[in-house]
Image (tube, rainbow, N blue to C red):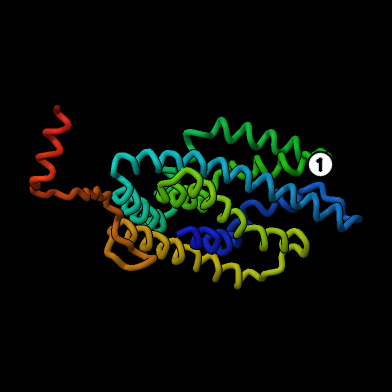
Amino acid sequence: MLATAFLFGLLGSFHCVGMCGPIAFLLPLDRNNSVKKIGQLSLYHGGRLFAYALIGLVFGLVGKGLNLFGLQQQLTIAIGLLMIVLVLLPYKQFQKISLAKPLYRIIGKVKSNLGAALKKKSPDTFLTIGFLNGFLPCGLVYMAVFGALAVGNTWEGSLYMVLFGAGTIPLMTTAIYIGNFLNGQVRQRIRKAIPVFVILIGCLFVLRGLGLGIPYISPKPMQPTIEANYECHNPTMADVQLTKNTNL
């Protein structure tokens, strides 16, 4: 399932360029020094990955807690179905149940701090911009969070989000260097393919939760086993005699 995180980020990065591209294009990069520019971009992406790692850590911990209560399979199936439903749900209906609404105040502060950071050019600025960028609301990030929740492990949840973020790096970096390099028709086709990929991931989560015994796709859940290896035998005359001698 971790491999799907990178692929999800790689395909989803076409959406990220449209959503987060304006922020990336406004980065106060040193255009005259290529080495310094690479370092600044690395700090920006590092900040994003750190933010994603923290998000994955929190939701991985929640998933681990649910796993301890024996709800991991049900949770995985529910998350898979939720992914599919959110893709098939009309966009206007999705806006009504937006996960970002309860967090508007926090998001407003993030955007305010992000705007202030874009005006600076110190090395830590790029790390700060990337870090704040990672907390901006995004439908694909929500989907990745579902994946981190479903893995049911704290560190794997964090790794899932990091791999998702790593998948967005190649295209985001390319867009920063050469701008809008894809024509509208190609972008439209890619955006149409993203929901299909999300549905496929949702189906994989459902299959995984069902535990059908399919290797790597739907393995059977591990059942704890307790082995007792005791040998019982009838006492011999030598054993009886030894017991009598011991009592004496």
- Near-viewer residue (36 or 188): 36
2 on left or right of 79: right
Q: Which image quarter holds the N terminus? A: bottom left
Where in the figure is residue 84, as x and y percent of width and height? 37, 58
Q: Residue furthest top?
A: 248
Q: Residue at x 49, y 58 (%)?
A: 2
Where in the figure is residue 205, as x and y percent of width and height? 37, 58
Q: Residues within 10 Å of mark 1 (few under 14, many from 20)?
A: few
List the residue tagged with mark 1: 123
SS for callout 1: helix
Q: Residue at x 86, y 56 (%)?
A: 35
Picture layout, residue 45 above or below residue 190: above
- Near-viewer residue (94 or 232): 232
Name the amino acid, label 1. Pro
Q: Residue at x 12, y 45 (%)?
A: 238
Question: In which quadrant of the rendered view does residue 114 lie?
Answer: top right
Where in the figure is residue 188, as x and y percent of width and height? 56, 68
202 on left or right of 70: right
Where in the figure is residue 133, as x and y percent of width and height? 64, 44
- Near-viewer residue (194 or 168): 168
